[in-house]
Image (tube, rainbow, N blue to C red):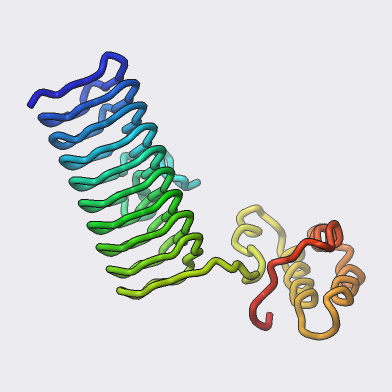
Amino acid sequence: MPVTIHPTALVADGADLADGVSVGPFCVVGEHARIGARTQLLAHVVIEGHTRIGEDCTIRNFANLGGPPHHTGYKGEPTELIIGDRNLIWEHVTMHIGTPQGRGVTRVGNDGMYMATCHVGHDCVVGDNVILAHSATLGGHVDVGDFVNISGLAAVHQHCRVGRYSFIGGLAAVTKDVIPYGLVWGNHAHLEGLNLVGLKRRNFDRETIAALRSAYRLLFAEEGTFQERVDDTATTFGHSAPVSEIIDFIRADASRPLCLPDREV
């Protein structure tokens, strides 16, 4: 079967298109792309980076495969995205290449369905017969076993493992490993503490971080009413600009519910 390329498509020299590949209108295929037999790129599809796609896949409009990882340490290294056979990849899906800090490759298995706007982050390993529903998201370094279903708008946190045959319900926020055959559900966010890693990355000094930690413990202690603790925190740690920012945020709209810790801080 011949390769067919629409006149409006841009296919770089060096791209490897197997027999029967179809490249539709306004697609862009990079020089390091390798596309397996009979795979179809419908319209406005972008294949970039060192990306290998298997046979008999259908990739629908505006999907972007092989883009650079959302990782601040990535400096343009030739890492990879490898996608298996017979996958159906819907509109606006994104799948990124790996990072040198991780596996160096993102792998997607065979016979999967990736619905509109879902995302497979860098260094993920996704098994066979996996379904990601609309806007489902895998953070970096996630391992997903075979026959997993991840429902719409669910998100799996970086480095989590999702066992084979498990099911993740819609809108779920998965921050811990899911056992094989398990069913997980729910997205009731609660406060886990301060974003200490982010503070350190943004060069907050030790004194500021220490004040924030002490203020946090006072603000979310069990003694007294919440309003009393807000006032006490403002009095005790008002000299700290970040603590004052938290107090101002809370006081700005008392009608708004806050994410609170679900256990003693």
- State the image quarter where residue 236 is shown: bottom right
Residue most extreme to the top: 7
For the point 25% across and 18% down, which residue is it?
6
Residue 78 x/y as whole percent: 31, 39
For the point 49% across and 64% down, which residue is it?
172
* Of the pair 212 and 130, the residue shown nearer to us: 130
* Of the pair 256 and 101, the residue shown nearer to us: 256
Residue 207 x/y as whole percent: 76, 65
Q: Is residue 187 left or right of residue 179?
A: right
Residue 97 x/y as whole percent: 34, 44
Residue 75 x/y as whole percent: 43, 40
For the point 70% across and 57% down, which residue is it?
204
For the image, the number of numbered tags is: 0
Q: Is residue 100 left or right of residue 212?
A: left
Asked if 58 appears above or below 16 in the picture, the reply is below
Residue most extreme to the bottom: 223
Q: Is residue 22 left or right of residue 223?
A: left
* Of the pair 15 and 169, the residue shown nearer to us: 169
For the point 65% across and 69% down, which residue is it?
191
Pick the quarter of the image with the C terminus.
bottom right
- State the image quarter where residue 234 is shown: bottom right
Pick the quarter of the image with the N terminus.
top left
Asked if 151 appears above or below 14 in the picture, the reply is below
